[in-house]
Image: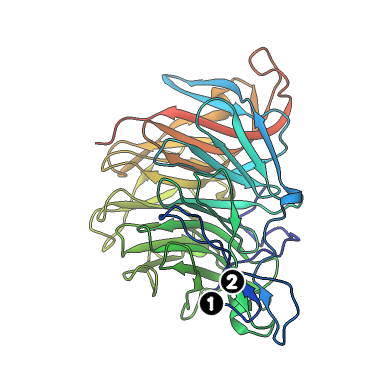
Amino acid sequence: MTTRWLFPLLCGFSLAACGPHDAAAPAATAPAGPSASNQQPAYPRCDGTPHGNHCVDLSDGLNPNEYEVASVKAVDLPLKDGTHEAVAMGLPGKNAFFNDVVENPGGRIIAVGGPGLVVATRDAGPWHVMTHMPYANTLNGIAVVNGTRAFTVGDEGAILRTQDHGDHWEAFNATFADYKDPQLREMRLGGDSRAKSYHAAFGDEAIGLVVGQAGVRDTVEAAILRTNDGGKHWSRVALSNAPENVALQQVSFSDPHTAWTVGSLGTVLRSNDGGSTWLPVSLDKTDVHLMGVDFASDQHGCIGGGYKVWCTWDGGKQWQAAAVDVPKKLDDNEALALTRLRMRDQDHGWFITRDGLIFTTVDGGHRWQLWMNVVEASHGKLTGIELWGLTLGKDKAWAVGVGSFAEGKTTPGMLGSSPLLMNWNIPPRS
């Protein structure tokens, strides 16, 4: 399971974050792109032939010999907590977990996680589960650009791109003249296993951001990558006095030019130029581990971490602390609290916690109340829950993570840990 509180798990994959080098190094080749006009060309790669000058790939790429795919029929478990209902889904036989989920414009659900850079998609019927490598590397976040293109990010700064709704994925690459190029290490977020990308977002089809952490000296520091051409090229954003011992966890655009990112130690950063430059924002001098940020409009958004939420109604000039109705006797360990927050419209929003609680607001974020305790709603059939990803689709909310299903009549063959997907109906946008 991906741990987002301290330094990351060690992994052995050399796929890393990306560089801005438009001009290929001497030995690089760039395959011709797909014929469709809205698709991008394949990323350049060193061709491996002898040359007078060296050519170094940023990433090793994905090995087709390590790729596995399976069609898996989910086992559904109805959940009921008072008048609130949801459905939990397990994937029998899959030893995996999910960290994030999206619904693309066509209604396809795409979940990402690990181990092995796992991507699962579903239109209707079975889930299409892809594993891209045999190692422990995970994917942590996913962002949809348009109806066909999306990007997912993960361990060691990995960035994968799809241009066919999630059916196939390609690892980002850039080429360098030699290993001593300082940009190579910069784009690899320090170049060791501490490098980790947690989330991505796009303000429009051109401007996109990836946030996470980079290894530096004996600690980590906040790291941001940016594209201005829809993901063809990425570059490391220079952060003046980059916060040390900070991992940026989430990023969100309130409009195509204004972006927000949050992370550990109460870190909040704002950009007014599409992510090129950033300024710190103060939230009541809090040092809470912030895990969620999302905007319903250019003026209205919320930030959350622990069991605390702050919302703005004036584009971020002022942030007001919200009331969160935390149940009595709840373990208030910050590491078990909020992992994702999503705003649907001016009235409705949701956040999930690592240990399986779902909270909602119906007044734009002034007050948040417990909507469902997933463990209790399963009536003993689902334990060991961790929820990490949340998205609000056309008419359903989706949350993903991992859980242990107890075998029964409604969950045959589901004894033990399984990737967890769950959904529930949500009201139309107001």
Disc 1 from disc 2: Cα separation: 6 Å
Q: Residue at x 68, y 34 (%)?
A: 70
Q: Quadrant of residue 56?
A: bottom right
Q: Position of residue 426 (x, y in %)?
A: 37, 30
Can residue 351 be seen? no
Taking the image as shown, residue 412 lies to the left or right of residue 317, namely right
User: Relative to residue 8, is residue 360 depicted above or below?
Assistant: above
Give the residue number, with chain letter if any, for mark 1.
Answer: 21
Q: Nearer the viewer, residue 15 or 291?
A: 15
Are the residues flagged by discs 1 and 2 in contact, CB closer than 8 Å? yes
- Residue at mark 2: 174
**SS at circle 1:** loop
Quarter of the image where one finds residue 129: top right
Residue 164 in the image: state x and y as whole percent. Answer: 50, 46
Q: Which mark is residue 145?
A: none
Badge 2 marks a residue whose secondary structure is loop
How was the colour assigned to the protein in this rendering? rainbow
